[in-house]
Amino acid sequence: MNVSAPSLNTGAGRPGLPLHARISADLAGMIRSGAWPPGWRIPFEHELMSQYGCARATAGKAVQALADAGLIERRRRAGSFVARPPIQTAVLEIPELQAEVTARGQAYGWTLIGRCERGADRGRPDEAMLGEAGPCLEIEGLHLADGRPFALESRIISLDAAPEARDADFAAVSPGGWLLGHVAWSEGEHRIGAAGADRAQSAHLGLRAGAPCLSLRRWTWRQGRGVTFVRLLFPADAFELAARFAPRTFAPRTFGPVDDKAQGG
Amino acid sequence: MNVSAPSLNTGAGRPGLPLHARISADLAGMIRSGAWPPGWRIPFEHELMSQYGCARATAGKAVQALADAGLIERRRRAGSFVARPPIQTAVLEIPELQAEVTARGQAYGWTLIGRCERGADRGRPDEAMLGEAGPCLEIEGLHLADGRPFALESRIISLDAAPEARDADFAAVSPGGWLLGHVAWSEGEHRIGAAGADRAQSAHLGLRAGAPCLSLRRWTWRQGRGVTFVRLLFPADAFELAARFAPRTFAPRTFGPVDDKAQGG
DNA sequence: AAGTGGTCTAGACCACAAA
DNA sequence: TTGTGGTCTAGACCACTTG
């Protein structure tokens, strides 16, 4: 009695795809269908070479893509093994508020409530997480949808990290929108929770005190230095975050346009 | 006056890393520091070959890694260009409740509140999202931390997709824990929001009615067929979700152990 | 038309972990 | 000790897109 693996179809159907993508798709199919359970050893690169009649580099590229997607784990000398499904990790899209509101067919608005420049206050835990102390800008404002409160924003911008913020007109443009054009690649963290609105918050949002709200806090660093912290408070019925989890698709890559910038070379 | 790019250091420091990783790290450094702004054209693979004295495949691997990480976009004939920072996308980790509670140094507990087998109810929007109708198991229960309510779980399991669930003892093991061992690779969606606890919910959680709660809903499919839907309700002060966003690190990969499964070969 | 990225080959050497 | 994955080379052809 043979316990051998269900056999690959060596990508007979799927014309037009690069060979390495077809191999990846075949392997991914065996894994997603459950035919190859977690812990199963997938074929060696050497075996894939003969099965598909390709060079080792091609087989290796296919297998490495599965490893990058998290479907398998690779171990020297042992082979590559189907991983356990990581149901706990998902990709979360935090929408731009203006785009989100507009997408709903509503008119977007922004109202500046207050703005002040001051030194860092290490006493506040949210602010301390940004790291180094220094002068900063504190901004509070309201995002509106069709003129009605949609989210209450409380933000801190480090003036060491973004000195140009001093001259920005945050009555006309929301800090988030302004920062989009003024911060390079960055690392960050989100924390999502629920909270009851306090008296001041509920007044701004037009809710009764203690009304349930979704709280989204975001810290942003650049090169390890704190740039900005923001807390957004949404009325419970106004907003919901969505996150998807799925193994990579191995569909052919598509390219979007990029605004070219003038440069030498 | 020359507008040429700030020069790469060709990975002089960073011994021990594979060459392609050093190239990736060098390029990523230029991008993250802002020296190469969005839209900037990074060196051609051909140029990297001469700068690093490597084969084109090596340069290509380094550049492709940046594209996979989303730092650049590649366009035929035009070159590779620094992308705009996607501050809206983050990786969200949904913890296992038992592990989460234990990690806090508290005792984890699970109490089954109710369980019933019934046909699908397409009238409920949450349930309809799973897709096909069919017999299902409805389960309600409470996750406890040190004996105190931590999360209220309402779950539906499709008996077509997981017939073994009929015989599982959900008084002894939570549905989430049971499903972990009985579902293969799957796709899913999370929706995160806030809500006020209704009368029944607040009673189970030991809160006053209307108390703010974090609501986490999850739909899970396998091969496009609905497997399970769950809604978890957390008291606002009991729980918070964290999500990180950052360009890929290019640090050397580490391998974890995998439980091997007996199989032919 | 020219030159880029996309793909692939047929080798090679090494480190490392499993047998 | 053996054989796997990890890395790399020096070529090649093709498709596509931009100039």
Image (cartoon, coloured by chain):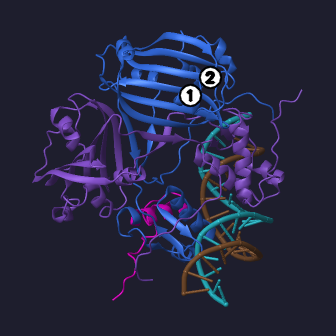
Chain colours: A blue, B purple, C brown, D cyan
Residue A119 spot, x, y in % from top left: 64, 19
Q: Is residue D8 left or right of residue A62?
A: right
What is the magenta range?
A: A1-30
What residue appears at the point 37 percent right and 24 percent down from the top-left corner? Answer: A234
Which three-letter amino acid code belongs to the residue tagged 1? Glu
What is the crowding at mark 2: few (fewer than 14 residues within 10 Å), some, or many (at least 20)?
Answer: some
Residue A4, image quadrant: bottom left
Residue A173 spot, x, y in % from top left: 54, 14
Residue A55 spot, x, y in % from top left: 62, 71
- Residue B84 visible to an observer of this rendering: no
Q: In this view, does A139 lie to the left or right of A85?
A: right
What residue appears at the point 49 percent right and 20 percent down from the top-left corner? Answer: A154
Is residue B67 within the magenta segment?
no
Calculate the distance from the C-alpha at mark 2 to the C-alpha at mark 1: 8 Å
Q: Main secondary structure of the magenta part?
A: loop
Q: In this figure, which residue is indicated by the disc labeled 2?
A: A120
